[in-house]
Image (tube, rainbow, N blue to C red):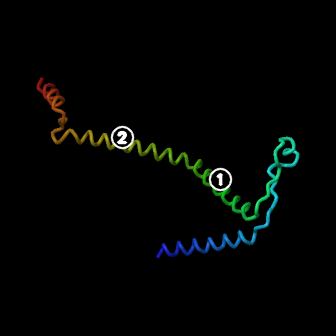
């Protein structure tokens, strides 16, 4: 059911965007730099594009700026999550190490067990 709703929404969105693009095909002149600054730089100052490309480009640029801004803003949260994950991994290793001693409190390593036995009999 959700799949059909998603396809329906995408179809309606596509129809709206195509209709908008067809209604705004006239070209507009965009100035890339202010006139005096363009003369000073010696670069071409204008570009002509269909209006719908300017609008869609503005939407895409706004989305990209928003995504990058949010990614940078959440840096502290990601760093804290990584620190907590490292700490949890370290604690899990410590638990495994402590459980490895077995029920008698003796290490599983035979040499260490012999050394500990010699230390307790003295």
Residue at position x 64%, y 57% in the image: 63
Other residues around mark 1 within 10 Å, as few (<14) / some (14–19) / many (≥20):
few
Q: Position of residue 54 (x, y in %)?
A: 74, 60
Q: Residue furthest left?
A: 121
Residue 47: x %, y % from top left: 79, 54
Instruction: Examine the rendered structure and indicate whether residue 116 appears above or below residue 60.
Output: above
**Residue closest to the eye, 110 or 117:** 110
Foreground: 4 or 98? 4
x, y (%) of residue 71? 57, 50
What is the x, y in percent for residue 117? 13, 29
Which residue was labeled with disc 1?
Answer: 65
The C terminus is located in which quarter? top left
Q: Look at the numbered discs 1 and 2 and tell me whether their residues touch, using CB distance below 8 Å.
A: no
**Alpha carbon separation for disc pair 1 and 2:** 37 Å
Residue under the point 16% across and 26% down = 115
Q: Is residue 9 left or right of residue 88?
A: right
Q: Residue at x 53, y 72 (%)?
A: 6
Instruction: Find residue 52 and report its image quarter.
Output: bottom right
For marks 1 and 2, the one nearer the N-term is: 1
Mark 1, secondary structure of its residue:
helix
Residue position for label 2: 90
Which element carries disc 2, helix, strand or loop?
A: helix
Residue appearing at x 27%, y 42% in the figure: 96
From the viewer's perspective, tell me whether residue 6 is left or right of residue 22.
left
């Amino acid at each position: 059911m959700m799949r059909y709703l998603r396809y329906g929404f995408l179809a309606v969105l596509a129809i709206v965007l195509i209709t908008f693009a067809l209604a705004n095909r006239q070209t507009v002149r965009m100035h890339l730099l202010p006139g005096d600054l363009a003369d000073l730089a010696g670069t071409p100052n204008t570009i002509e594009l269909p209006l719908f490309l300017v609008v869609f480009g503005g939407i895409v640029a706004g989305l990209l700026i928003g995504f990058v801004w949010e990614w940078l803003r959440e840096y502290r949260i990601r760093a804290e999550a990584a620190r907590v994950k490292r700490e949890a991994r370290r604690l899990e290793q410590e638990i495994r190490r402590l459980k490895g001693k077995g029920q008698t409190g003796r290490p599983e390593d035979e040499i260490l067990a012999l050394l500990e036995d010699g230390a307790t009999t003295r």
